[in-house]
Image: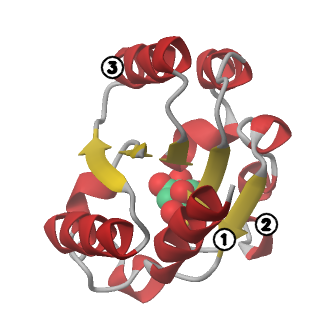
Amino acid sequence: RKVLVLNGPNLGRLGKRQPEIYGTTTHAELVELCVAWGSELGLDVEVRQTNHEGVMVDWLNAAADDATPVVLNAGAWTHYSLAVYDACAQLEAALVEVHLSDPKARPEVWRHTSYVEPHAALTVAGHGVDGYRRALEFVAAG
Ligand code: DQA
């Protein structure tokens, strides 16, 4: 079963970006982990990252067309993108929201709102890269 793992802005710098918050695993390593976890779970996982909101909307629209399950870390778009909100609303298969940190426990009040959460079957936050494994387990079980 095909599953898309879609990562939004600034996540391409994982490992270098504020490692005290986001950890030391690089995006390339996250890709390898997700593919390996997926194959253990019988899932065909494809991981993508973009800093461009329109590209993310295109990917979400294609996932809606194909009824592909999506694991989404929308980064900062989570907190303000109505285009991402509308794209998530159209998804047919499971949507799992993932964050490495726990945005609701962070000091910036703007991180406490999620435009992905209303459409997500599950939100996993604050578990670092292991959150992606939990998200894939949820998709595999569904
Ligand atoms: C994040 C949390 C967001 O608040 C932040 O803007 C990110 C990463 C996370 O994975 O913890 O870019 O989605």
Q: Is mark 1 within 8 Å of ligand 1?
A: yes
Mark linked to residue 104 = 2
Q: Quadrant of residue 126?
A: bottom right
Work out which residue is located at the far right of the displayed protein and give it. Answer: 118
- For marks 3 and 1, the one nearer the N-term is 3
Helix, strand or loop at disc 1? strand
* In contact (CB < 8 Å): disc 2 and disc 1: yes
Q: Secondary structure at mark 3?
A: helix
Residue under label 3: 55
Q: Is residue 127 left or right of residue 106?
A: left
Q: Badge 3: how crowded within 10 Å, few (<14), some, or many (20+)?
A: few
What is the distance, in whole Å, between disc 3 and disc 1 at their CAs? 24 Å
Mark number displayed over residue 125: 1
CA separation in Å, label 2 and label 1: 9 Å
Q: Quadrant of residue 112?
A: bottom right
Dots 3 and 2: beta carbons under 8 Å?
A: no
